Image (cartoon, rainbow, N blue to C red):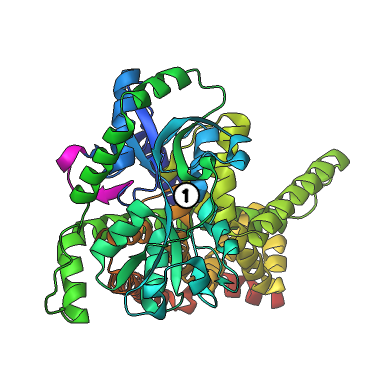
Amino acid sequence: MKKLVITLLTGLALLFAWVQPAHADDYLRVGMEAAYAPFNWTQDDDSNGAVQIEGTNQYANGYDVQIAKKIAEKLGKKPLVVKTTWNGLIPALTSKKIDLIVAGMSPTEERRKEIAFSDSYYRSQPVIVVRKDSDYAAAKSLTDFKGAKLTSQQGVYLYDLIDQIDGASKETAMGDFAQMRQALEAGVIDGYISERPEALTAEDANAKLKMVNLDQGFATNDEEVTTAVGMRKDDARMSQVNAAIATLSADQQVALMDEMIQNQPLASENEEEETPSFFQQMLTIVQNNGSQFLRGAGMTLLISIIGTVVGTGIGLLIGVYRTAPQAKTKALAFFQKLFSWFLSAYIEIFRGTPMIVQSMVIYYGTAQAFGIDIDRTLAAIFIVSINTGAYMSEIVRGGIFAVDKGQFEAATALGMNHGQTMRKIVLPQVIRNILPATGNEFVVNIKDTSVLNVISVVELYFAGNTVATQTYQYFQTFTVIAIIYFVLTFTVTRILRYVERRMDSDTYTTGANQMQTGVIK
């Protein structure tokens, strides 16, 4: 047991030393989704002036990326894209995980309360994207969308524009435009509100979709249709950022956007041809993106394995402590009780809150409140570990109570203290008894790592979502991801079942049974 603990601690120390935040002074860390073409997208090489995405061997490109490059040049920095979910952009900025937000963000009044904005670097126009074969494809005005099921992205002004359409069904807002395209193609919604460049991208990439040009469109104000760079309010580089933006005239902005529309992935793949079968499409996705899936699966396994092992260790320690006899002195008894309250609070909090919320609080909250900059991979391991520890502590406690009381009495009669009793008699039985529950927790952790995409950990779901936004084949891509998750969990389950069979012997209780027999005699 001691060798195992030392080995685990050494491995964690090496991992912490190896995985360091890429926070060099010569980089300008720019936050964006890298999934909102033609403003920003993900690609596999650095062609057409793409910029590397932090923590991956992939690159980001698009109109936002080109603007970010001009700003970085003005500031004397190298641009580095930090791929971040839309809802995580402002927390990432305010917690200093990134330096700028260049993601097609509008400088609304609500956002100005949290961050500052530069001058506008693009003006857009809201439109509606529908299926080409739907009744709404021939719409000319907003009134033609009466009864339509419409949505847009969560947290953007486009979603509120649906209120201007009388009789329209305002569906739940979605996380990103990739989800909206998938929902539209599947018939879950009748259309979504977007901006003209993104709508042109969707129309060009998928022959089933169409951008509707309205004679009488949405009523908007200036701050809604402009996009600007988001910055922290205490950032003194605002004038330099505005100077970089000013180098592009309105005509040059349009020309740059047109160039990005031409350079975006799948921009010229909308030809009418025989559609491959579903299986062939899946096979093509695996062949073209297998390395991304492997890296994502590797990160998922790394986080879930370390999280499960460390969490089980935490659970064992807490379980042993909470079953220890009360200290004899009043002072020690008081501190023992106080620490027990702390452990109870820890268990209830982490069992009673979702891991996705814990991720946001730990990764962004600690940086914003205390200035603690945690690498996202280490943060992910920490989150999974303490979450697993909270669940495992109760499992271990139940396993300890399941051991026959007579074995404790026999150990006490032989002069063993609580630590010796636990180490030599109880814990070997507990470990065997909780092995099925530990395996179940491991399987749960493999699946739950998917929520860590909210802090941009490049695990399996994050990698799959990236591929889906590149190929526009959402159902096919996520079917591949589901198969990979199943293979991982099925393999882990079979391995743990084998371990259980190997340990399925009564020899581990022989010593305890002999002691009990001696006491009875």
Left or right of 455, for residue 19: left
Residue 143: percent from the left, percent from the top? 52, 70
- Location of the C terminus (image quadrant): bottom right
Q: The residue tagged with tag 1: helix, strand or loop? A: helix
Examine the image and state in which quarter residue 418 appears: bottom right
- Camera-side residue of 307 and 87: 87
| Magenta highlight on residue 125 | no
Q: Given the image, on which type of amino acid does mark 1 rest? A: Trp
Stretch in magenta = 39-49
Examine the image and state in which quarter residue 407 appears: bottom right
- Camera-side residue of 209 and 187: 209
Answer yes or no: is residue 24 visible: no
Q: Residues within 10 Å of mark 1 (few under 14, many from 20)?
A: many
Residue 342: percent from the left, percent from the top? 74, 48
Left or right of 45, for residue 299: right
- Residue 207's place in the image compared with 160, above or below, is below
| Magenta highlight on residue 42 | yes
- Residue 266's place in the image compared with 186, above or below, is above
Q: Residue at the front extreme?
A: 215
Examine the image and state in which quarter residue 293 appears: bottom left
- Residue 508's place in the image compared with 246, above or below, is below
Q: Residue at x 63, y 35 (%)?
A: 113
Q: Residue at x 28, y 35 (%)?
A: 251
- Camera-side residue of 407 and 231: 231
Residue 361: percent from the left, percent from the top? 59, 45
Q: Residue at x 27, y 54 (%)?
A: 295
The residue that label 1 is drawn on is: 86
- Camera-side residue of 183 and 161: 161
Query: Total of numbered circles in the picture?
Result: 1
